[in-house]
Amino acid sequence: MLEPGGVLTQSLTSVPMSISRSSVPPASGSGTVAFVLGGGGRLGACEVGMLRALFERGIIPDLIVGTSIGALNGAAVAVAPTPSTVDRLEEIWTTLDKSEVFSGTVFSGAANLVRTRTALQSNQPLRALIERLLPAKTFTDLAVPFQCVAASIERAAEHWFSEGPLVEAILASCAVPGILPAVIIEGEHFIDGGVVNSIPIARAVELGATEVFVLHVGRIERPLTAPRNPWQVGMVAFEVARRHRFARDMASLPQGVLAHVLPAGETAPRFDSFEQLRYKNFRSIVGHIRSAYEATAAYLDDAALVRPSGDA
């Protein structure tokens, strides 16, 4: 049975706000600490608040894995896992409405769709943002080991990037179908990693993580209900497809692996909200960051998850 902040004792029937499965002490300073950053578009702002709460308590990753917008946030942290990086991320996020990322009118989007036949937006503004945010050019330039996932169209499989050019890998992981174009790398087409692995906790475990902090965008905290109209049918189906792997991965964590699913607060929209489709609406960014920060800080403090300064 699961309760928020509780321990996994039987089966995973729903995903709680935060859970652990291990007898080892949390934030002990031993073992491998991983940050897992999930996808979720503009709701990825929640992860910035979570990162700030973690760094304020001296919790620093030894490993980072990310999907979609989590790949972008995660790569920034992998360059320099410091509070100043979070400051930079927050500055980027809170000024997105003034940037050219996802800019343009309905007409320009339609024109781009006619031109490309597959995408409403060019990925060039996003590329420019990534290059501005990340001084690192390749995975080997990063201070913390980092991997990100994208979906291979030709192989119908997840593909993990761990070497080579960093910007191309992040663009591939962020290539939301229909909104951004697929990214071609060595003749293969890649789209958003959330299609195959939205919150890749199992990958962190495969890479040796013994303590995992899951940074997500809040959707998994919202319970699903049976659909009552055609719109909800589609959204429920999408959420079931999105959540089932994470639920399975959490239920099958090996003994000795401690997982913390950090709370995002109360700002995430319901699973059937049209708000999720307004990918250009950045007005609520500050609220997402603040809510996730406050909720995560409270959880970490309640669980005494503060790493001694000598271990940071």
Image: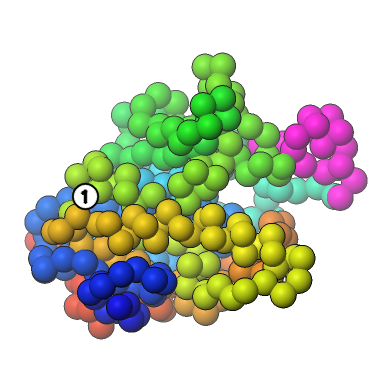
Helix, strand or loop at label 1? It is loop
Q: Which residue is mark 1?
A: 209
**Residue 46 shows in this picture:** no
- Give me the residue at 55% from left, 21% from top: 188
Question: Residue 48 is drawn in which quadrant?
Answer: bottom left
- Point out residue 191 in the picture as x, y percentages from the top left corner: 58, 36
Question: Residue 84 is drawn in which quadrant?
Answer: bottom left
Answer whether residue 113 is magenta in the image. Answer: yes
- Give me the residue at 16% from left, 66% from top: 22
Q: How is the image coloured?
A: rainbow
- Which secondary structure is most common in the magenta stretch? helix
**Is 307 displayed left or right of 188 in the figure?**
left
- Point out residue 165 in the picture as x, y percentages from the top left corner: 44, 26
**Is 281 displayed left or right of 237 in the figure?**
right
Few, some or many C-alpha atoms within 10 Å of disc 1 (few <14, some 14-19, many ≥20)? Answer: many
Question: Residue 137 is drawn in which quadrant?
Answer: top left
**Residue 165 shows in this picture:** yes
Quadrant into which the N terminus falls: bottom left
Q: Residue furthest top?
A: 187
Quadrant into which the C terminus falls: bottom left
- Give me the residue at 22% from left, 78% from top: 303
Q: Is residue 74 above or below residue 4?
A: above
Answer whether residue 107 is magenta in the image. Answer: yes
- Give me the residue at 33% from left, 40% from top: 146
Label 1 amino acid?
Ala
**Is 68 displayed left or right of 75 in the figure?**
right
Please provide the residue range marked out in magenta. 106-126
